[in-house]
Image (cartoon, helix red, strand yellow):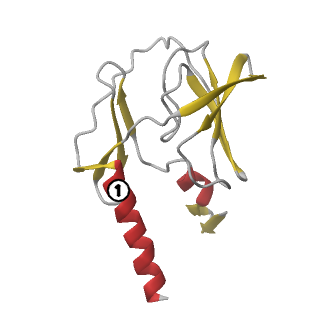
Amino acid sequence: MEVEVEGKPMFNMNRIFAGGDNKTYKNTKTKEYVKEYVRENLLIEVNEKKWKITQESKQIGSYLCFKAIDIESTNTKMKPVVWFTPQIPVSFGPKEYNGLPGLVILVEMYNRTISASKIVLNPKEKIKLKKLIKGERITSAAFKEKTKNFWRNIKKKQ
């Protein structure tokens, strides 16, 4: 769903669902994983998900990918399934879909997908990553509670 005002996208549900303008920082050595939430200037500490890795595989682009299922998700309708490739041995993916022995290429859940559109290995120009330091630091559980309270307040006002 996208709403346009004077030809410019204003509200794109798919973009918001995929993380919007928020940034993610992961230090693979220290296992620190932080997500920036720009609307409230928060840094959310994220724990790696627990996955069940299956033997099911498929080719996505030039990568052999394996299927993994989020075993912690209680929402059976939106239970995420990810496809990751051990050919790129980086434990990372979009949003909170991480913690697997390879790069997450595709996330599927209910009627949405998030997929890698471009992968650049060994770029010619050196990329400098900056640790996210702005904002109040909170746990993932505290952020979840904050979100629940927000939606409760919205419902009360209706």
Which quarter of the figure has residue 115?
A: top right
- Residue 104, image quadrant: top right
Comparing 118 with 124, the one in front is 118
Q: Position of residue 25 (x, y in %)?
A: 36, 34
Which residue, given by chain and number where applicable, does mark 1 sit on? 143
Residue extending farthest bottom: 158
Q: Is residue 51 left or right of residue 113?
A: left
- The amino acid pointed to by label 1 is Phe
Count of all numbered marks drawn on residues in the image: 1
The crowd level at tag 1 (other Cα within 10 Å; few <14, some 14-19, many 20+) is some
> Is 133 on the left-hand or right-hand side of 107?
left
Give whichever of 5, 120 is nearer the camera: 120
Q: Which residue corresponds to the image point at 23% horizontal and 46% vertical from the top-left?
A: 134
The location of residue 77, given as percent across then percent down, is 68, 55
Q: Secondary structure at mark 1?
A: helix
Residue 93 against residue 120 in the figure, above or below: below
Against 50, residue 120 (above or below) is above
Residue at 39% from the left image edge and 15% from the top image edge: 126
Q: Can residue 140 be seen in the rendering of this structure?
A: yes
Kindly indicate the quadrant of the structure image that contains residue 60: top right
Residue 38 visible, this angle:
no
Image quarter where the N terminus lies is bottom right
From the viewer's side, name the closer residue of 81 and 134.
81
Q: Residue 134 versus residue 65: which sits nearer the camera? A: 65
In percent of width and height, residue 122 lies at 50, 11
Q: Position of residue 99 (x, y in %)?
A: 48, 28
**130 vs 41: above or below:** above
